[in-house]
Structures are given as C-alpha cells and as structure tokens.
Image (cartoon, helix red, strand yellow):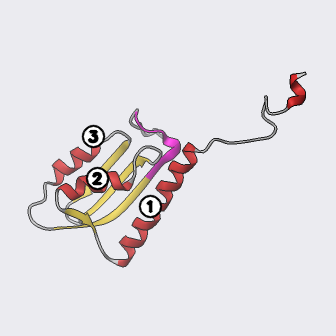
Amino acid sequence: MSKKEHKASVDTTYLVKRHLKLDGEGDIPWDQIEKEIDQLMGIDEIHLVKEKHTISVAYDASYKSLEDIEKILDTHFIHTAEDWWTRTKKSWYEYTDNNIKDNVKHKAWSCHSSGSSDKTKK
C-alpha cells in the first residue's frame, strides 16, 4: 500500500475535500481553469470533470477556502450550481472552512500552564 504524497504547501491536519456541481455556458477552458486553481498555495489536488460539470478539490482549509477557488471560477464565468443540494453542501463547506480557520488562530488557555501561578515565583 503506497501513501499519497501531498504538496509541501499543504498541512494534512487541515486537509479537506470538496465536490460541487458547476454551471457555466459557452466554450469553457477547463484545462486552463484547472491549472490556475492547482497553482494556488494550499491546493493539494483539483479535478474538473467536463462531462459532468463538477469540481473535486482538496485543500488546506487553514490557509485556503472555497471562496478562493470560486474567485477563479468567476473570472471564467463559471459558478456553483443553484440547485438545493449544491447550495446546502456549499453552505456546509463554508461553515467548516471558517471553523477550521478560527480554530487554527485560537490560542489554548489553561490554568495549569507554567508561569500562570504566582506561587511558583517565590
């Protein structure tokens, strides 16, 4: 069994995988979009399936979010589908991305940590 190698810019502790349906019209440069997203720092892997109009992406949620990927899609006039299931998944993805980012910034506190008691400073 071989282990998958991840990009150096990805902390696997915060690695998330997202799958969404896309909407877009006209001649869509799928390969170019895939390359642009893949070059973002924190993106581990990206797959655009042209026939199904879907995106599958894995990224370090402590550094990137779905919004960063959507910005690139928007420049090519592509957006996530507006059906109920896609909107629900997208909402959940955004919530968990924000939660991960908030938890990474949080500094743990404990009354048992060294230096927190005046008794040790006699």
**Image x and y of residue 52, in percent:** 24, 66
Q: Nearer the viewer, mark 1 or mark 2?
A: 1
User: Identity of the amino acid at label 3?
Assistant: Gln
Q: Residue at x 44, y 60 (%)?
A: 94
Secondary structure beneath dot 1 equals helix
Q: Return the residue at label 2.
A: 47
Q: Which mark is residue 39?
A: 3
User: Identity of the amino acid at label 1?
Assistant: Tyr
The residues tagged by marks 1 and 3 sit, at their Cα atoms, a distance apart of: 21 Å
Q: Which mark is residue 113?
A: none
Secondary structure beneath dot 3 equals loop
**Image x and y of residue 7, in percent:** 38, 36
Q: Quadrant of residue 40?
A: top left
Residue 13 within the magenta-colored segment of the rendering: yes
Q: Return the residue at label 1.
A: 93
User: Identity of the amino acid at label 2?
Assistant: His
The foreground one among 15 and 111 is 111
Q: Nearer the viewer, mark 3 or mark 2?
A: 3
Q: Residue at x 34, y 46 (%)?
A: 45
Please report the bounds of the magenta region as a residue range: 9-16
Q: State which quarter of the image contains the C terminus.
A: top right
The residues tagged by marks 1 and 2 sit, at their Cα atoms, a distance apart of: 17 Å
Pointer 3: residues within 10 angstroms few (<14), some, or many (20+)? few
Pointer 1: residues within 10 angstroms few (<14), some, or many (20+)? some
* Chain-order first, disc 1 or disc 2: 2
Q: Quadrant of residue 88?
A: bottom left
Q: Residue at x 44, y 61 (%)?
A: 93
Looking at the image, is 115 positioned above or below residue 42?
above
